[in-house]
Image: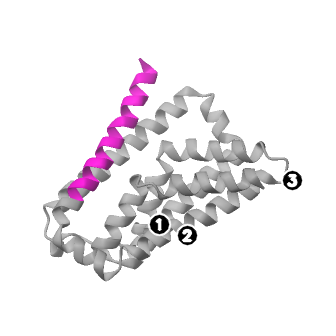
C-alpha cells in the first residue's frame, strides 16, 4: 500500500506542476471558458492513457531500446510545442474578438496532440509502472495506472474548472498579453529543449 500511495503522490505532483499541458489548460480556460478547457483536458488525459497503456504493456521499454524512435518522438514533440508557443505568441497580439475559436472536436484533438507528443509523459509513466512492479500487491501495475489516470482527470479538469471562474477570466482580461507571452515562452522553450536533446542524441 505504501508503494501505491507513493506512486499516486508522485504522479499527482508531476501532473499538477505547471508543464505544457497544464499551462495550456489554464490559458484556454481563462481565454475561452470552461467547456473548451475541459475538452482540451480530456484530450490530454486520453494522450496520458495511451502512454500509460504503452508503458504497462512494455512498449515504452522497447522505445527506450530503439534510439531512433525516441529521437523521433522528441523531435516531433519539440516541434509541436514550438508551434503551440508560436500560436500563443500570436494570440498575445490579436484582439480577443479576432481570435478564431476551434470546434469542440478540435479542442479535444489538440489536447491529445499536445500530450501524445510530449516526451515527458513517456518518462513519467515509465516511472509509475516501475513503481507498480516493485510492489508485492497483485495487479499492482494496473492499480497504479488506473489510480493515477483517475487522479490526472481530477487535476486537469479541476484546473479547467478553476481557471474558468470569473476571477480568473477577469485577471486574464486584464493581463491577457502578459499571460499569453508567458505561456508562449514556456511552450517554445520546452520545445527547443526537446529538440536540443534529440539533436544531442544524434551527435
Density class for disc 1 (Cα within 10 Å; few <14, some 14-19, many ≥20) is: many
- The residue tagged with tag 3: helix, strand or loop? loop
**Residue 198 sits inside the magenta stretch:** yes
Vertical order, 69 against 98 (above or below) = above
- The residue tagged with tag 2: helix, strand or loop? helix
Q: Is residue 5 left or right of residue 162?
A: right
Q: Which mark is residue 140?
A: none
In the picture, which quadrant includes the N terminus? bottom right
Q: Nearer the viewer, residue 86 or 3?
A: 3
Task: Name the residue carrying label 1.
Answer: 41
Q: Which mark is residue 138?
A: 3
- Mark 2 or mark 1: name the one nearer the start of the chain: 1
What separation in Å lies between label 2 and label 3 (alpha carbons)?
25 Å
Q: Main secondary structure of the magenta part?
A: helix
Task: Name the residue carrying label 2.
Answer: 154
Q: Which numbered mark, 3 or 1, is in the foreground of this view?
A: 3
| Region rendered in magenta | 180-203
Q: Is residue 137 left or right of residue 203?
A: right
Amino acid at each position: 500500500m505504501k508503494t501505491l500511495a507513493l506512486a499516486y503522490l508522485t504522479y499527482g505532483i508531476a501532473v499538477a506542476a505547471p508543464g505544457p499541458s497544464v499551462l495550456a489548460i489554464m490559458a484556454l480556460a481563462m481565454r475561452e471558458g470552461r467547456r473548451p478547457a475541459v475538452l482540451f483536458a480530456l484530450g490530454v488525459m486520453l494522450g496520458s492513457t495511451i502512454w500509460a497503456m504503452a508503458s504497462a504493456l512494455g512498449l515504452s521499454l522497447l522505445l527506450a531500446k530503439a534510439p531512433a524512435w525516441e529521437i523521433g518522438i522528441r523531435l516531433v514533440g519539440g516541434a509541436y510545442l514550438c508551434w503551440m508557443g508560436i500560436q500563443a505568441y500570436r494570440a498575445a497580439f490579436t484582439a480577443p474578438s479576432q481570435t478564431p475559436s476551434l470546434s469542440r472536436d478540435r479542442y479535444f484533438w489538440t489536447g491529445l496532440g499536445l500530450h501524445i507528443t510530449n516526451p515527458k509523459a513517456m518518462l513519467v509513466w515509465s516511472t509509475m509502472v516501475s513503481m507498480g512492479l516493485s510492489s508485492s500487491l497483485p495487479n499492482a501495475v494496473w492499480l497504479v495506472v488506473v489510480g493515477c489516470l483517475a487522479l490526472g482527470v481530477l487535476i486537469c479538469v479541476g484546473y479547467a474548472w478553476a481557471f474558468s471562474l470569473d476571477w480568473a477570466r477577469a485577471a486574464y482580461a486584464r493581463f491577457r498579453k502578459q499571460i499569453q507571452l508567458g505561456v508562449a515562452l514556456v511552450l517554445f522553450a520546452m520545445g527547443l529543449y526537446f529538440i536540443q536533446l534529440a539533436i544531442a542524441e544524434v551527435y
